[in-house]
Image: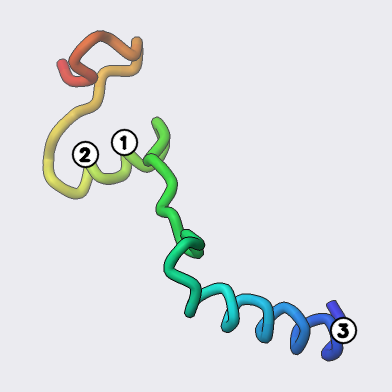
């Protein structure tokens, strides 16, 4: 990405962030990998089969 493209993108994001009708940063829902990592960090085990409750 060129410096001109970066500047244009930064200006667009700046103007959009001031507009209350625009959702600029919507966090993504964690996927299986993120849930497994979080489970390991907290000592919980996430079911590999993707069961109804997601734990075993």
The residue beneath circle 1 is 36
Residue 25, x across and y down, in percent: 46, 62
Please give the name of the residue rendered at 41% of the width and 35% of the height, measured from the top-left corner: 31
Quadrant in which the C terminus is drawn: top left
Identify the image quadrant of residue 2. bottom right
The residue that mark 3 highlights is 2
Gap between marks 2 and 1 measured at Cα: 5 Å
Residue sitting nearer the eye, 8 or 40? 8
| Depth order, front residue of 19/12 | 19
For the residues marked 2 and 3, what is the alpha-carbon distance in whole angstroms?
40 Å
User: Is disc 3 surrounded by few (<14), some (14 to 19) or many (20+) residues within 10 Å?
Assistant: few
Residue 41 sits above or below residue 21 on the image: above
Residue 42 pos. (x, y %):
13, 46
Quarter of the image for residue 5 reads: bottom right
Give the x, y percent position of residue 39.
Answer: 21, 39
Q: What quarter of the picture does the N terminus occupy?
A: bottom right
Side (left or right) of 16 relative to 10 = left
Q: Is residue 44 above or below residue 46?
A: below
User: Which of labels 1 and 3 is toward the front?
Assistant: 3
Closest to the observer: 39 or 18? 18
| Sequence-first disc among 2 and 3 | 3
Q: Residue at x 37, y 42 (%)?
A: 34
Mark 2 touches mark 1? (CB < 8 Å): yes
**Residue at horizontal 61%, vertical 76%?**
13
Q: Which residue is mark 2?
A: 39
Tag 2, which secondary structure? Answer: helix
């Amino acid at each position: 990405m060129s410096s001109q493209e970066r500047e244009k993108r930064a200006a667009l994001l700046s103007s959009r962030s001031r507009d209350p009708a625009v959702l600029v940063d919507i966090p993504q829902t964690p996927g299986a990998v993120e849930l497994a990592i979080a489970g390991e960090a907290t000592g919980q085990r996430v079911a590999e089969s993707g069961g109804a409750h997601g734990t075993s």
